[in-house]
Every structure is written in structure tokens, then in C-alpha cells.
Image (cartoon, coloured by chain):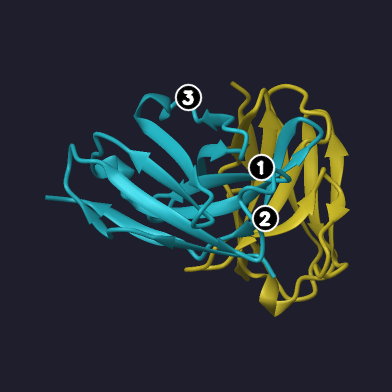
Amino acid sequence: DIQMTQSPSTLSASVGDRVTVTCRASQSISTWLAWYQQKPGKAPKLLISKASSLESGVPSRFSGSGSGTEFTLTISSLQPDDFATYYCQHYKDYLLTFGGGTKVEIK
Amino acid sequence: QVQLQESGPGLVKPSETLSLTCSVSGDSVSSGTYYWGWIRQPPGKGLEWIAYIHYSGSTKSNPSLKSRVTISLDTSKNQFSLKLSSVTAADTAVYYCARVVFSGNYPDYFDYWGQGTLVTVSS
């Protein structure tokens, strides 16, 4: 099975900061990677698919990059609404797996 | 606007079978364009994919749960369902249903999610 490792598990940042979350795969997954945002008590919300394709309606301060085994989610200027937990998710061999999550907290 | 809504018992006894239904509006589970899936999240923990199903009857389950999972479609009601047998306290979680986008012949990501329903396993 492919393991997805997200880092950091927790990130403390201030409004306006540039924030980067990393997801590493134990083997190449090409660009089969999605990113989700989850707020407490809510369902996850799709932000990015295919590693870098921003979903309609998602603010442009969010961006995704990477291929193969290393991927990043970047928030260019953190806004109050962005404090949440972020998950990566990949596909391999018809199986779907989520990373462990990164909680973005207020510094 | 696609909407999904989970329903089912909030409390299940150990060793019994957990049964949940997802009602879909704004799309048809029989259109064949998408797959339909279940994901769960234990309290305070991360997300775990459970299974997905296609109108064609094609299904796939997480190997860690495979022997206990049954997923099915009811096209007449535009719903799909999950059954998880022999539950233990470790199956206590918020269960989400979601639409699965396929790219080519491969499952890719979940674009629409239900609000989730908490299922507690306890006697």
C-alpha cells in the first residue's frame, strides 16, 4: 500500500502569512492528488484536484503543486477563514487514501 | 446543485451491523457518470475511505474493511447504502457519503459530500 505522509501535523501562523503544507507519497502517484479543507463539525471541502487544478469558487490564494512523490498546498496570504485542517488524498490501484491531516492554527 | 444526505441509526450495539443510507439530489446515481462512496472519521482523527460503487455494479472497498463492508445502490430511490458488519467501538465515527469523480477509468477524488452522521458503537 502507498503511504501518504503529511507535514507538519500542526502549523501555527498569522493572518497574512504564506503557508505551505506538504504531502509525501511512499511511491510515485503521478498527479493523482487532491487537497481538502475541513472545519470543525463540517464535511471536507474539495480545494484542488489533480495536484494543481483549483476547484471553481476556491480563492486564488490557494494553490497546489508537485508530482510523483512530493506535493505542496500553498496559501499565499492566510485569511481568518483559512484556519482549518487540510488533508491530501490520493488514488492508486483503485484504492483511495487520505493523509493524516495538517491543522492550521492561529499563532 | 448536488446534495447528499446521510441517514441511519446513531447508535449501534457491538457485533451488530451498521446500516446507513445516502440520499442524492441534483444528480442521478444511475447516470453512470460518477461513482458514489463512503468515508468515515473517528472522533478527533483523520479521514478513512470505506468503499465506492458505480451504477454498473462495480464496487471497491478499503482492504482493511473489505470483509465487513457491503455497498449497494437503490436507483428507484436515488440512494446508495452502506452496511458494516460485526462492529466494535473502533467503528465509532462520523460517516460521510460523497460523489466520486473518475478520471478515465480510475477513481480520482470526492467532489460533493454529505454533512456526515455520527454513529456510536456501544452497548
For the residue carrying disc 1, how many other residues have a C-alpha within 10 Å: few (<14), some (14-19), or many (20+)? many
Q: Say if labels 1 and 2 share a chain.
A: yes
Say which element carries label 3: loop
Mark 1 vs mark 2, CA separation in Å: 8 Å
Q: Which residue is mark 3?
A: B63
| B53 displayed left or right of B102 | left
The residue under label 1 is which amino acid type?
Gln
Mark 2 vs mark 3, CA separation in Å: 23 Å
| Nearest the eye: A40 or B31 | B31
The residue at 25%/39% (across/down) is B87
Q: What is the chain letter for disc 3?
A: B
Mark 1 vs mark 3, CA separation in Å: 17 Å
The residue under label 3 is which amino acid type?
Pro
For the residue carrying disc 2, how many other residues have a C-alpha within 10 Å: few (<14), some (14-19), or many (20+)? many
Determine whether B87 is above or below A103 in the image: above
Q: Which residue is mark 2?
A: A36
Q: Which residue is mark 1?
A: A89
The residue at 34%/30% (across/down) is B68
The answer to whether one can see residue A9 in this image is: yes
Q: What is the chain letter for disc 1?
A: A
Residues at circles 1 and 2 in contact by the CB criterion of under 8 Å: yes
Where residue A29 appears, as percent x and y from the top left, is: 77, 28
Say which quadrant the N terminus of chain B sits in. bottom right
The residue under label 2 is which amino acid type?
Tyr
Q: Nearer the observer, disc 2 or disc 3?
A: 3
User: What chain is colored cyan?
Assistant: B
